[in-house]
């Protein structure tokens, strides 16, 4: 039954192609179908049908061949299918709207992507060449056909005749190797190069176009041009150490390099130097990939023929090159190739290479040994399989260098000449700077490239020509500057200035100058009260300070009548504020008051009751018991408190969200505050900057949450108890800690359940309260192994105690 279905599907598939042939106006016979006339959608549609029936491309190829489709058309169909498969997958991945006709020719030829991936950036020379998706070795069918191309069955030839007679012939070389022209007969061209075939075809065309042999000036001159329009497909076997060995259908314009790229190239164990091409059972050519990569040589990179065999054998000899070379890595060497050939392969040495002696590590009698190679006298040194060549770097050492640094205009390295003196070196370096320390300089001198010593000199005596020093190779001269020999001197200013800062000390700077460069006075600054803190030595090892009081003009005007007060190193200038000066502080009130909004504090003792009075008093809808004061925290002061709060909060069984809160609700008793007509009481808090007083509307509900069966918001009933509200939420859950139930009131206060002996005193419920039932902390039960371990430990301890008692 299955065979019948498969056969029926094949008939449908072939019939589909015949229908397409009829639609595009050609013969229904598959022997004359032209794949180029099919649209991409048509090709994909019929390929999808074939896949649904379980056919692969090789199976489809055999079926179409049996139905008379020419091999070159089958090759075109395979190429179209592969191109469209790749294009569709690319478009799906990128989500682009590009047409499926846009094919990436860099990827469509060769491996399909399902092969085993190899490590990137492999050090074997030539290996990455075949793994690079940026390189395309797809044969270019649009170029002129090479003269040495040999024709064969399946090639398509266009013969164009013009001049005194016009005609054109689009012919395919048949299996017999001939083309047939009406009134001429068969012309056998198989095996001929395209150049020889052109000459032969023209000689046959003279039988019906006599003008082909006429001179160019003749009125009946006929011209004829012969060109290859479509190359045949050849079957090539690639075997041995390649990534994907097998049989490949390639264009007859493909070369050995094209075939190697299609198969993924040689593996790490394959040879790159001796690629063998076997034709008709005999060794035809050998191809050396290194010659192509280094010299561009095409020797051995021949055009392939049907049934050619490409053999990639394992490598014979491979060496490794490390160090200061242009292309470090592994290189394959042929028999008889020397270190000179290897240098050509890795591109030569870098500028930092030490080329006088090269080191070769070689395995000898089960262990390694090192050979030194004098490259000048031994360029014919032969390397063996497994050798490792290491090229070291030149040492960081100068033959004729001295250096100078410090308080000079052009520090750096200089050439040492015979008899070079220190004074001459200073002159080479542009001379001394104004801040040079003239009493002492230093010379660092190296002996035997290991031992170092220093000796001082008087810079002043060197400059005045009273003495001099003869310099030696690798001497390093240091000219000190005055600032480097002194501690860094500073001036500081703080208080009521716009830009408090610390600057480097400057001579003859007065207080007014320092205030000016610090942005001037802030509002509220008192220029009559300026303190200067100055260091004074007390004769011991400590540094103490004294305070100097100064006064200046508010507008920093220069007073020529008063003596100038200059600042000294490490002075600290403090600008004070005027007595009683404070910046306005704002508070706000929200909710059920006559005039909610922002208010400025009028005095430092302003309290909650004062703010309510200024806001016009409470409205008739105010819920006094729910009043709350929101106070911002001083982050620097309360940072540790916030940290402690988060630590406690992290242990909360309700897992409340943790955050560094910058404000808190303060539970206040507004009833007590407003007693006695607003007279001050302990409940009447003094207001701070940023305080916000919230007077809510009368609440009528209670929120029950936590470990209850159903979290709920319940209507407030003054006669209901805490248990009544929990019952309204379904009662306690199995994980509830009943004795830890607590209530958060609308004003932010918290009240917990209190226990005395066997009696529990539950908190009273007020409108707007939140009842919270905590969750039990899950305790991890001891495992069997832990119980056994504890029991064994106790038993051992018992035996030890018994032994000690006895």
Image (cartoon, grey):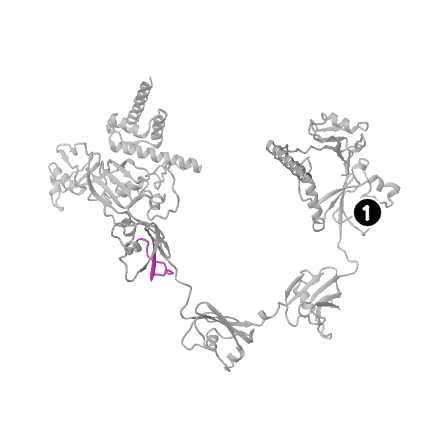
Name which quarter of the figure residue 767 lies in.
top right
- Whether 359 is among the magenta residues is yes
Report x, y in % for residue 269: 32, 43
Name which quarter of the figure residue 266 lies in.
top left
36 vs 635: above or below? above
* Residue 79 as seen in the image, left or right of residue 721: left
Q: Quadrant of the C terminus?
A: top right
Name the residue nearer the viewer: 742 or 198. Answer: 742
Residue positioned most to the front:
806
174 vs 339: above or below? above
Residue positioned most to the bottom:
466
* Residue 607 as seen in the image, left or right of residue 48: right
Magenta stretch mostly in which secondary structure? loop
Name the residue nearer the viewer: 244 or 783. Answer: 783
* Residue 594 as seen in the image, left or right of residue 119: right
Instruction: Say if residue 411 shows up in the picture.
Output: no
* Residue 107 as seen in the image, left or right of residue 447: left
The residue depicted at 41 percent of the width and 63 percent of the height is 395
Magenta region: which residues?
A: 345-360
Residue positioned most to the right:
676
390 vs 237: above or below? below
The residue depicted at 39 percent of the width and 62 percent of the height is 394
Q: Which residue is mark 1?
A: 607
- Whether 775 is among the magenta residues is no
Name the residue nearer the viewer: 190 or 318. Answer: 318
Report x, y in % for residue 594: 80, 40
């Amino acid at each position: 039954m299955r065979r019948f279905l498969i056969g029926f599907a094949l008939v449908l598939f072939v019939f589909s192609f015949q229908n397409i042939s009829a639609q595009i106006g050609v013969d229904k016979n598959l022997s004359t179908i032209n794949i180029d006339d099919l649209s991409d959608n048509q090709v994909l549609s019929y390929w999808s049908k074939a896949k649904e029936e379980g056919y692969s491309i090789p199976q489809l190829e055999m079926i179409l061949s049996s139905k008379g489709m020419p091999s070159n058309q089958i090759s075109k169909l395979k190429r179209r299918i592969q191109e469209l498969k790749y294009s569709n997958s690319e478009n799906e991945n990128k989500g682009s709207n590009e047409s499926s006709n846009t094919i990436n020719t860099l990827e469509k030829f060769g491996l399909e992507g399902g092969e085993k991936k190899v490590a990137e950036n492999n050090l074997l020379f030539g290996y990455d060449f075949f793994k690079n998706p940026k390189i395309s070795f797809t044969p270019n069918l649009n170029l002129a056909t090479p003269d040495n191309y040999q024709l064969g069955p399946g090639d398509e030839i266009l013969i164009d005749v013009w001049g005194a007679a016009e005609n054109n012939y689009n012919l395919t070389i048949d299996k017999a190797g001939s083309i047939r022209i009406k009134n001429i007969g068969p012309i056998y061209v198989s095996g001929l190069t395209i150049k020889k075939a052109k000459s032969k075809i023209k000689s046959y065309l003279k039988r019906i176009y006599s003008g082909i042999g006429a001179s160019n000036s003749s009125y009946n001159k006929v011209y004829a041009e012969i060109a290859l329009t479509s190359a045949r497909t050849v079957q090539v076997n690639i075997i041995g150490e390649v990534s994907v060995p097998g049989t490949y259908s390639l264009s007859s314009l493909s070369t050995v390099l094209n075939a190697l790229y299609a198969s993924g190239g040689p593996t790490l164990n394959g040879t790159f130097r001796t690629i063998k091409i076997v034709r008709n059972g005999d060794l035809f050519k050998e191809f050396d990939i290194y010659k192509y990569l280094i010299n561009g040589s095409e020797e051995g990179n021949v055009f392939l023929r049907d049934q050619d065999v490409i053999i990639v054998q394992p490598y014979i000899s491979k060496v490794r090159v490390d160090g200061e070379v242009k292309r470090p890595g592994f290189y394959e060497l042929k028999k008889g190739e020397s270190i000179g050939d290897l240098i050509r392969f890795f591109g030569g040495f870098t500028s930092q290479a030490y080329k006088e002696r090269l080191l070769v590590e070689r395995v000898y009698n089960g262990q390694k040994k090192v050979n030194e190679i004098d490259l000048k006298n031994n360029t014919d040194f032969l390397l063996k399989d497994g050798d490792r060549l290491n090229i070291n770097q030149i040492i960081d050492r100068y033959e004729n260098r001295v250096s100078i640094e410090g308080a000079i205009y052009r520090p750096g390295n200089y050439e040492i000449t015979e008899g070079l003196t220190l004074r001459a070196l200073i002159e080479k370096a542009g001379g001394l700077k104004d801040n040079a320390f003239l009493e002492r300089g230093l010379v660092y001198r190296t002996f035997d490239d290991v031992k170092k010593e220093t000796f001082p000199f008087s810079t002043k005596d060197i400059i005045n020509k009273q003495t001099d020093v003869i310099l030696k190779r690798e001497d390093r001269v240091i000219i000190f500057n005055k600032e480097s020999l002194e501690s860094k001197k500073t001036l500081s200013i703080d208080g009521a200035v716009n830009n408090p800062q610390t600057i480097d000390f400057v001579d003859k700077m007065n207080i007014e100058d320092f205030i000016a460069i610090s942005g001037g006075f802030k509002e509220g600054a008192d220029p009559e009260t300026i303190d200067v803190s100055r260091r004074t030595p007390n004769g011991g090892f400590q540094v103490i300070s004294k305070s100097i009081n100064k006064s200046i003009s508010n507008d920093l005007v220069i007073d020529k009548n008063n003596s100038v007060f200059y600042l000294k190193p490490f002075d600290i200038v403090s600008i004070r504020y005027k007595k009683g000066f404070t910046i306005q502080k704002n508070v706000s009130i929200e909710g059920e008051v006559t005039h909610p909004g922002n208010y400025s504090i009028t005095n430092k003792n302003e309290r909650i009751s004062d703010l309510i009075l200024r806001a016009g008093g409470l409205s008739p809808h105010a819920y006094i018991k729910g009043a709350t004061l929101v106070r911002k925290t001083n982050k620097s002061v309360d940072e540790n408190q916030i940290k402690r709060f988060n630590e406690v909060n992290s242990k909360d069984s309700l897992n409340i969200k943790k955050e560094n809160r910058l404000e808190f609700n303060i539970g206040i008793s507004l009833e007590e505050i407003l007693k006695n007509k607003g007279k001050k009481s302990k409940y009447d808090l003094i207001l701070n900057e940023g305080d916000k007083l919230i007077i809510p509307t009368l609440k009528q509900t209670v929120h029950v949450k936590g470990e209850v069966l159903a979290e709920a918001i319940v209507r407030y009933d003054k006669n209901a108890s805490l248990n009544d509200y929990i019952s309204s939420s379904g009662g306690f859950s199995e994980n509830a800690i009943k004795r830890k139930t607590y209530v958060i009131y609308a004003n932010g206060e918290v009240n917990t359940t209190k226990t005395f002996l066997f009696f529990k005193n539950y908190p009273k419920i007020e409108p707007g309260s939140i009842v919270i039932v905590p969750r039990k902390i899950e305790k991890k039960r001891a495992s069997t192994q832990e119980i056994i371990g504890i029991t064994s430990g106790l038993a051992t301890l018992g035996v030890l105690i018994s032994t000690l008692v006895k």
